[in-house]
Image (tube, rainbow, N blue to C red):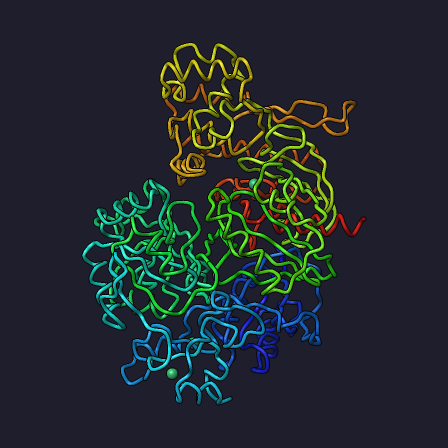
């Protein structure tokens, strides 16, 4: 199948023969398309078979001209436009590079060589960087990007650094964070009381020794603190979990090198590219089945077939990992669900109950930038958390946009804004549950004026009246545009796939405010940029206790059983969710459901996953958001059955007399699931058939809607098996499925969708 790839390359790629190189490579692979310079970087579009486009990207990086240095490279697969031949297009003047804030960039090969070469003056210096690598976004205080406007301003250049900085032939010509052991930042090791106990290399070596001995180190990195412990040491990892109050959620790992990653995980070519990329995200990789010793302790990611893996991305991490030579847990330095800690004095306070020691330095971190998280699904990247290495790079929408600030959702919050023809998505901020997180949210918005020179004229918010983001937005005194949550999901996915006009949006997640007073989350929207019609949704059921059901999947199951069976749901033999309740809880749920007390109706697909996980006995209560649904995905066997359960479509549909919506009834499926479980069918088979049913339901609604373009968005599409299955079934049935690539399908992408919907609404007046 012919596809179009769109590539944005930033770095030293202009004036080094990059465009002729791209032209030659594209011609060799017989790809049609174009390459163009702009102040915002080099942009490439090419069309051809997917396998050729994959080769094209890999070879772009591998075979680039000697003087070209890539600092950021993002690509998406899009619909082909039918280019004829390949051309070098005239440079465009659009976009203002002076206003472009670059992300932090992983250590380049030259700097890496220097820090391990005893003959170099930056031998073992943890703050080595050059024009091609090092900190950017995390140290910029204001623009233009000059040393005086960064947190490096306090460090006066020594004579030798100054010569390099001023020499146009030097790799460090105008490298703003340039530093060396004589003039730059230095390491210190602090004990739990904040006393400096070692300096410089000694601090690093002592930290390594402590980690080796099973201690937990708080390490000040690029965009915040990590908590680091020996990933092989189950005792140390369990202690870290207990202290961080993070019971079961998987912990991210840093491996010393790619060879070590390969020993623990399956790594495809694209996954390896991501691990080694200048953006250096955390990549979710499937564990390898290795006989004998497990390369990481069981408590790193209990019951999870994947590991979140990254490689060292600063000289400090490289030095530490070279010293250790084994994988470490490198999780963000915070208490569960709070924003990442960026200041050493703050760390002493906030991390005191977690860390045994603190490896710190005197280069201030100006703003939090978490590690990004990506995974590969069906040969494409899927962004799960967009932060370090990616934020805040813009998308050009190719048309002037009104000045909009979009404040995002409640969980996994990020904000978005427009300027000129660009829309920007901020770094991941976090769940706006704590005061710390709300403060971080406000800091990011304060940055808009100071750093990005953005003065919004309109604010886009979620329709939920109680979201703290929406309350904050109301306090700004600007005209508000309320965007429905699931419409925002669809708009974000449509925008990144360059779709305009009407699409069928499949918007599935846990929770979103529905304008009809129910909780939405299993929605089919016939949507365009500024409006939508809810043409179908999953049948509603009550959630006893409302929000509490998010933490207790058994509540979703009980609500669903009650909707289906009424009072008979409480008669023996009790299914797993009710058997997992005390008699008092059963009575309470029964009373709540019978009287519809504090039991809102929901059409949430996320809660369907919860209910099935609970019924299958996989999980009754969650230790972290989405755990039951994830475990239901993990239960699907490697060789899943292709069959599915029945479902029913009821209601008149949007075209009928009542102009209502189709209701996708899960009851036939649930009856068969209960029967399967009674017969002793394994939870894995039930899980696979459940996923298959959901994919079939998507195809059926697409048929009814008669809309060729089907956009898959919402947190449920973080699920790799569901996404794969839905894409394959839709394609087999002649539809064109679109999924997320550069923007998270979860609520981290909501702000971008809000901005797009608001812009379209304003344009239409
Ligand atoms: Zn470098
Ligand atoms: Zn120096
Ligand atoms: Fe959502």
Q: Quadrant of residue 663?
A: top right
- In the figure, 742 relative to 646: above or below? below
Q: Residue at x 77, y 29 (%)?
A: 655
The number of callouts visible is: 0
Residue 726 seen in this snapshot:
yes
Q: Quadrant of residue 542?
A: top right
258 sits left or right of 667 in the view: left
575 sits left or right of 97 in the view: left
Q: Nearer the viewer, residue 182 or 86?
A: 182
Image x and y of residue 37, in percent: 64, 74
Residue 7 seen in this snapshot:
no
485 sits left or right of 73 in the view: right
Task: State ligand 2's quadrant.
Answer: bottom left
- In the rendered image, the residue lying farthest to the right is 765
Q: Nearer the viewer, residue 752 or 664?
A: 752
Image x and y of residue 215, in percent: 22, 54
Image x and y of residue 551, in percent: 43, 32
């Amino acid at each position: 199948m012919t596809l179009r790839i769109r590539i944005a390359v930033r770095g030293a790629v202009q004036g080094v023969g990059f465009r002729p190189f791209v032209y030659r490579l594209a011609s060799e692979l017989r790809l049609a398309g174009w390459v163009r310079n702009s102040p915002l970087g080099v942009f490439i579009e090419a069309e051809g078979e997917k396998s050729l486009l994959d080769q094209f990207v890999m070879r772009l990086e591998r075979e680039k001209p000697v003087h070209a240095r890539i600092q950021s490279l993002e690509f998406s697969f899009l619909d082909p436009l039918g280019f004829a031949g390949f051309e070098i297009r005239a440079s465009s003047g659009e976009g203002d590079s002076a206003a472009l804030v670059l992300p932090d960039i992983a250590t380049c090969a030259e700097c890496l060589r220097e820090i391990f070469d005893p003959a170099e003056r930056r031998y073992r210096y943890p703050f080595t960087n050059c024009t091609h690598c090092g900190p950017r976004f995390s140290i910029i205080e204001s623009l233009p990007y000059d040393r005086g406007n960064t947190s490096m301003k306090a460090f006066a250049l020594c004579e030798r650094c100054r010569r390099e900085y001023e020499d146009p032939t030097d790799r460090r010509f105008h490298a703003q964070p340039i530093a060396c052991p004589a003039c730059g930042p230095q390491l210190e090791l602090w004990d739990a009381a904040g006393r400096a106990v070692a300096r410089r290399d000694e601090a690093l070596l002592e930290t390594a020794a402590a980690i080796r001995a099973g201690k937990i180190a708080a390490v000040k990195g690029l965009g915040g603190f990590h908590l680091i412990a020996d990933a092989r040491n189950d005792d140390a990892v369990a202690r870290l979990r207990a202290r961080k109050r993070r019971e079961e959620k998987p912990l991210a790992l840093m491996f010393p090198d790619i060879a070590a990653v390969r020993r623990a995980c399956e790594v495809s070519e694209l996954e390896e590219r991501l691990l080694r990329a200048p953006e250096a995200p955390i990549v979710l990789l499937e564990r390898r089945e290795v006989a004998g010793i497990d390369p990481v302790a069981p408590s790193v990611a209990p019951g999870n077939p994947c590991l979140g893996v990254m490689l060292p991305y600063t000289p400090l991490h490289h030095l530490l990992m070279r010293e250790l030579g084994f994988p470490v847990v490198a999780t963000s330095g915070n208490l569960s669900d709070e924003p990442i800690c960026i200041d050493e004095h703050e760390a002493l306070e906030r991390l005191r109950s977690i860390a045994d020691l603190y490896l710190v330095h005197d280069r201030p971190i100006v703003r939090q930038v978490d590690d990004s998280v990506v995974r590969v699904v069906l040969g494409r990247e899927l962004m799960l958390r967009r932060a370090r290495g990616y934020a805040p790079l813009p998308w050009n929408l190719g048309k002037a946009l009104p000045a909009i600030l979009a404040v995002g959702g409640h969980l996994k919050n990020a904000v978005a804004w427009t300027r000129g023809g660009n829309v920007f998505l901020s770094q991941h901020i976090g769940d706006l549950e704590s005061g710390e997180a709300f403060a971080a949210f406000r800091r990011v918005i304060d940055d808009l004026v100071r750093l990005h020179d953005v003065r919004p004229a309109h604010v886009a918010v979620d329709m939920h009246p109680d979201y703290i983001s929406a309350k904050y937005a109301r306090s700004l005194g600007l005209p508000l545009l309320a965007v429905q949550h699931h419409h925002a999901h669809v708009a974000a996915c449509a925008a990144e796939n360059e779709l305009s006009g009407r699409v069928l949006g499949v918007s599935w997640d846990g929770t979103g405010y529905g304008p009809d007073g129910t909780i939405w989350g299993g929605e089919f929207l016939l949507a365009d940029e500024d409006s939508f019609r809810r043409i179908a949704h999953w049948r509603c059921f009550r959630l006893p206790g409302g929000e509490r059901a998010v933490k207790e999947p058994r509540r979703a199951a009980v609500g669903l059983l009650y909707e289906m069976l009424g009072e008979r749901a409480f008669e023996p033999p009790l299914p797993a969710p009710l058997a997992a309740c005390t008699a008092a809880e059963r009575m309470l749920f029964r009373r709540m459901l019978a009287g519809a007390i504090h039991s809102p109706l929901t059409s949430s697909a996320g809660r369907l996953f919860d209910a099935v996980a609970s019924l299958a006995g996989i999980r009754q209560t969650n230790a972290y958001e989405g755990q039951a649904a994830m475990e239901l995905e993990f239960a699907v066997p490697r060789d899943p059955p292709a069959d599915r359960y029945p479902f029913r479509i009821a209601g008149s549909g949007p075209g009928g007399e009542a102009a209502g919506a189709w209701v996708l009834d899960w009851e036939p499926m649930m009856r068969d699931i209960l029967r399967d479980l009674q017969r002793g069918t394994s939870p894995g088979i039930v899980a696979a058939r459940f996923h298959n049913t959901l994919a079939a339901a998507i195809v059926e609604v697409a048929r009814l809607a008669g809309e060729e373009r089907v956009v898959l968005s919402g947190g449920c599409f973080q699920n790799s098996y569901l996404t794969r299955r839905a894409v394959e079934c839709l394609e087999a049935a002649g539809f064109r499925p679109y999924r997320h690539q550069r923007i998270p399908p979860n609520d981290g992408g909501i702000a971008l969708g809000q901005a797009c919907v608001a812009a379209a609404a304003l344009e239409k007046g």
